[in-house]
Amino acid sequence: MAGLKNAYLLRVYQEVCARNRGEQEFLQAVMEVLESLGPVVERHPAYEAEGIVERMVEPERLIQFRIPWTDDAGRVRVNRGYRVQFNSALGPYKGGMRFHPSVTPSVIKFLGFEQTFKNALTGLPMGGGKGGADFDPKGKSDREIMRFCQSLMTELQRHIGDWVDVPAGDVGVGAREIGYMYGQYKRIQNQATGVLTGKALTTGGSRGRTEATGFGLLYFVAEMFQCMKGQSLGGKVTVVSGSGNVSLHAIQKAQEFGAKVVAASDSAGYVHDARGIDLALLKQIKEVERARISEYAARRPGARYAPGFEGIWTIPCDIALPCATQNELDGKAAQALVDNGVTAVAEGANMPTTPEGAHIFLQNGVLFGPAKAANAGGVAVSGLEMTQNSMRLQWTFEEVDARLKEIMAGIFHNTHRTAKDYGVEGNLVMGANIAGFLKVAESMRWQGV
């Protein structure tokens, strides 16, 4: 709590800690936002008088439910499902569903809290929500996943709707899972609505959704470099962690901007290819064969593989893009990047940098794009999918991509401008937190207690 010098914010955080004991992910996310709000509550005393921060850190609704399903051997299995409807001040709750054994109320609340501000930054009318289950789709057959998704939606359908709460995909939830959930919702409700995003193109999905988070990340980074450095991305040596959907499309767009991407990783290790990543080969290994990234080094002359993904941050680079998982880039890794001359870091995953790591970047003048701003491309295009569903239209890829680029540029400039307005020019973490908070706070004030 050393970062909270404002008595009001300190009191709110102490109350959050007392109510959410042991929920470290959620508490970390709350602290990261509250640390930015000192200048805001000092300038706007009405926020304390009206309990805005107390209300904003408490989810409007947290739903927990049982998910019974039958595996292929006929054995009944039981998982636990969640949906947090965190804040609806700006519109219907919007946020993904995550299927992973690590899913807990703390994780879901952290993600829903972050989503509230991320959605606000897009400028689209979306509130914040998140959901998931402690179910691991790895090693499960399509039939088992279908039965699980149908059982989950049998309960979840009563809590969602296209003007209430619109889930999407996240870790462990792709087009297959969205399809099974959508089919069950339609079967029960007898409605073909835009209740889920990430749908197939044949059923109201949006072009550009797969590419959105990775492409959006690079649109943000390119705008950041142009505005704050007066430079393009051409020739910039870049390290991208991960090798999933976000990472692959971040690599693709970085290469299109002329950057030289030299590293990627998975949960087992990382590869360093000084000549530049062969994206076609990496996609073949990760998307088609679903093999370990060590296969890349085995087939690519000159590429080096190392076990343990942490070492990826010791590779000298101009730009580092953590796109794998939360808290993957700690203080030690951040210092290694700084010592090797990194110029910019932007988060493609949700909260991939620890508070210590973020502090090191900011203290050393590294351009740092926080997740709630830099990786908002995915939810932005989800919002555009909702728009297309409401209009009964489907835009071309070029139309969606142009809107995505415009949204990400707008997020950067709003973040940058807000940081300057509150006396912390160049601090995009504070700029993003304050800009997102202000939009939600003013909407909450307008609607009353």
Image (spheres, helix red, strand yellow):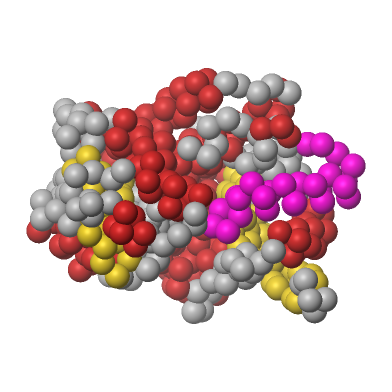
**Snapshot quadrant of residue 112:** bottom right
Residue at (24, 31) in percent of width and height: 258
Pick whichever, 176 or 35, lies toward us.
176
Residue 257 sits inside the magenta stretch: no
Q: Position of residue 304 (x, y in %)?
A: 22, 59
Q: The N terminus lies in which quarter of the figure?
A: bottom left
Q: Is residue 37 left or right of residue 120?
A: left
- Magenta-drawn stretch, dominant element (helix, strand or loop): helix
Q: Is residue 243 visible?
A: yes
Residue at (49, 50) in percent of width and height: 287
Pick whichever, 304 or 172, lies toward us.
304
Count every numbered label the image shows and give the total: 0
Q: Position of residue 226 (x, y in %)?
A: 22, 29
Q: Is residue 446 left or right of residue 389?
A: left
Residue at (64, 46) in percent of width and height: 175
Q: Which residues are magenta?
A: 169-193
Residue 182 sits inside the magenta stretch: yes
Pick whichever, 366 or 268, lies toward us.
268
Q: Is residue 340 left or right of residue 73?
A: left
